Amino acid sequence: MRPNILWIVTTQWRAQAFGFAGDVNVRTPCLDALARQSVQYTEATTPHPFGPFARAALITGIESPANGVRNYHDPLPAGLPTIAQSMLDRSYETFFFGKWHLARRDPAAALVGEAHARMIVPPESRGGFQFWEGFEGGFQLNNPWLHGTRLPEPQRFAGYQSDVVCGRAAGLLGGLAGPWFAVVSLESPHPPYAAPAAGFPPLNPAALTLGPNVPVEAAARARAELSGYYAHAQATDRAIGALVAGLPEETIIVFTSVHGDMHGAHGRFRKGWPYEESVRVPLLVRAGGIASRDARAISLVELPALTLSWAEDRRAVPAGRGDWAKISMPSVVELADQCDRAWTGLRSPGRKLVLWPDGSPWLFFDLADDPHELRNLVAVPARRAEMEGLRERLRTLR
């Protein structure tokens, strides 16, 4: 019997911010339990540390901009093959719940607020999913608006967004025989960090432990934002735990996030930056009773191929590029705090090279010796040959 398969996709939840990852600030008991039952891909990265670019790559298995999403407001092109269509071709029922962020949006419209949350995503723009229930965006972490297959008009639901979306997904999926493939897409722990977090109070900012790459001038803001960020992480951990508990144990479960958040590292905030806090993401795969840690390079763009392998009863081994994963920002997103430049790069568990759009080096880190990226080696003569070799490798991947 072919397995049911669930992707749980969060937003802005960096790889470091979990109990199972060693973060002393946060309690994530449900995801810690899931991690103990899963393959933990400890070196997983997003192909693009910004929402629409990453989501388009995740759902198509094609990096941006080759998938048609070059700029922040570009929609996923209609008719582009997606994982939903591929699974439907394999006689799977397909479901999507939650945040979409891939429809055509008015660049002049407000990103935050009820108007964006109530925006209707037309059926032809829903990526080929048979069942779709969610919202385009709006960052309404409480009392979300949902519309879709069984909700022709936007309807507001009382409660914390993660609880609402996970609850509705569990209520539908838990009663199906399958095989089905579903995506549950959650906005948390994305800003606004000061929003209520389902009864989890903000943590004491003064008690938080910051990384050694957070400079003094960024520490106060980092502490203030992390206090709310961790509260939303804990609330969403609980919601995910309830979702997982409501599904059969043999369900293959993937947990990840489309990107991370800098939270003051290197004096930066939000995402789009090529640093570890932005590009490294959690990736847990509970499948076949296998529990282990996998330190190979893997990108979220590989998840569609991995998912198809489960649907076809092939070995659950990622079809990665080997020791390296490509990372990039296809264009500048002109929003406050976000990365102010386009770039492309190559990352392995031990090295990271980032290039300017003209191909010249911007950043080169020895992650094995310098995991917090405190020493940029671009100008070190002794590393020049290694760096040039990686530039050539990156050119072959383009």
Image (cartoon, helix red, strand yellow):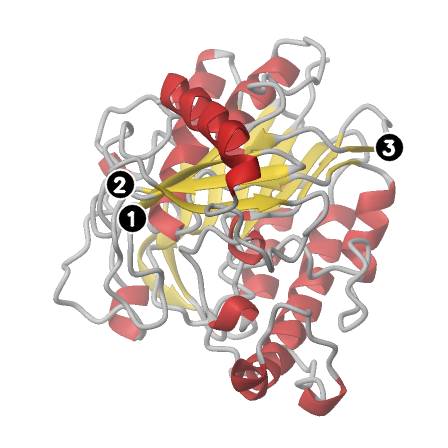
Residue type for callout 1? Ala
Secondary-structure class at tag 1: loop
Mark 3 secondary-structure assignment: loop
Tell me the residue that label 3 is attached to: 291
Closest to the observer: 381 or 300?
Answer: 381
Q: Are marks 2 and 1 in contact (CB under 8 Å)?
A: yes
Q: Position of residue 58 (x, y in %)?
A: 45, 35
Q: Distance of mark 2 from mark 1, alpha carbons?
A: 6 Å
Viewer-side residue, 30 vs 245: 30
First along the sequence among labels 2 and 3: 3
Residue 129, picture quadrant: top left
What's under tag 2, amino acid-wise? Pro
Q: Between residues 292 and 277, which one lies in front from this camera angle?
A: 277
Single out the mark in the foreground, 2 or 3: 2
Residue at mark 1: 342
Q: Quadrant of residue 249?
A: top right
Image coords of residue 275 (percent x, y): 52, 54
Which residue position is annotated with label 2? 357
